[in-house]
Image (cartoon, rainbow, N blue to C red):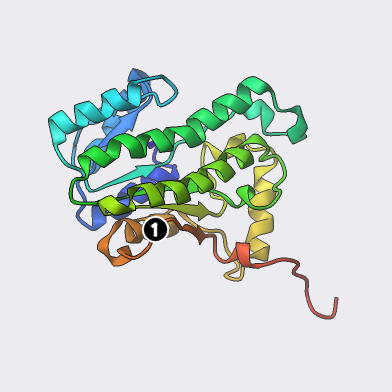
Amino acid sequence: MGLANKFSIAYGISEALRKQGAELIFTAQTEYFKDKISDIARDFGGHNVFLCDVSKDGEIEQTFNKIADEMGEIDFIVHSIAFSDKNELTGKYCNTSRANFLNAMNVSCFSFTEVCKYAQKLMPHGGALATMTYYGAEKVVPNYNVMALAKSALETSVRYLADDLGEFGIRVNAISAGPIKTLAASGVGEFSKILEYERHRSPLKRNVTREDVGSACTFLLSDLASGITGEIIHVDCGCNTIGVKFSVGN
């Protein structure tokens, strides 16, 4: 859920899952996006693309009913959906509008809660769900603003959802990916500076890639991670482990 184009994190995850033999289906917000995603879906086996605007009441339930009718059971879900008015991803957080705050929370956080609610019915033998978060939920990142609040709420939701669904053999985790140059990320003010800063700060001396995130997500969704739930897994080349870093002697 949330695949938009070939440059997105969701595409990298889809590639990694497909390489391990997963059969994939996708959702799209509108007919316009459905047409675009259908072309991409053919690269991954040609399975269905279902309409699902997570901001609309009842649409998530309707979508999962259709998936149940056409596909039956599913084993995992990747939720890679978030939204904020890009004009509010610059400047001060205190200037956030009420409307954008509520919309960001609805699309970026509550949608995952509702997805988990209806996905449970399609996972009678257990399964796994993963969503995407970012370090801005933990520490202040310039211009991330209201998205930081939405991701922080999302991370807390992961822990509560893991507790809710654990008795059904369903695991719930999140990946906190480092900054990656995507079309969505371009909406964050001065994103290129964040990329450069993270590259220098990272213990691995590079930025994380879509392939890195895809591999980690595939692991979390697989039986190899059968004992992991309620976790926020950082895939950021180690940036989250660094506080202040400078060259010795300078």
The answer to whether 151 appears left or right of 201 in the picture is left
Q: Which of 185 and 6 is in front in this view?
A: 185
Q: Mark yes or no: residue 170 visible.
A: no
Residue at image coords 27%, 26%:
63
The answer to whether 22 appears left or right of 143 in the picture is left
Q: Which of 70 and 106 is in front in this view?
A: 106
Residue under numbered circle 1: 229
Is 41 situated above or below 134? above
The answer to whether 57 appears left or right of 70 in the picture is right
Residue 53 pos. (x, y %): 39, 23
Residue 52 pos. (x, y %): 34, 25
The answer to whether 240 appears left or right of 95 in the picture is left
Residue at image coords 61%, 62%:
240
Is 199 situated above or below 138? below
Q: Which residue lies furthest to the right in this view?
A: 250
**Which quadrant of the rendered structure holds the N terminus?**
top left
- Label total for image: 1
Q: What element carries label 1?
A: loop
Residue 17 pos. (x, y %): 28, 53
Quarter of the rendering containing residue 188:
top right
Give the amino acid type for the residue marked by disc 1 in the picture.
Thr
Residue at image coords 57%, 63%:
206
Is 242 situated above or below 166? below
Residue at image coords 47%, 33%:
110
Q: Mark yes or no: residue 24 visible.
A: yes
Is 239 situated above or below 9? below
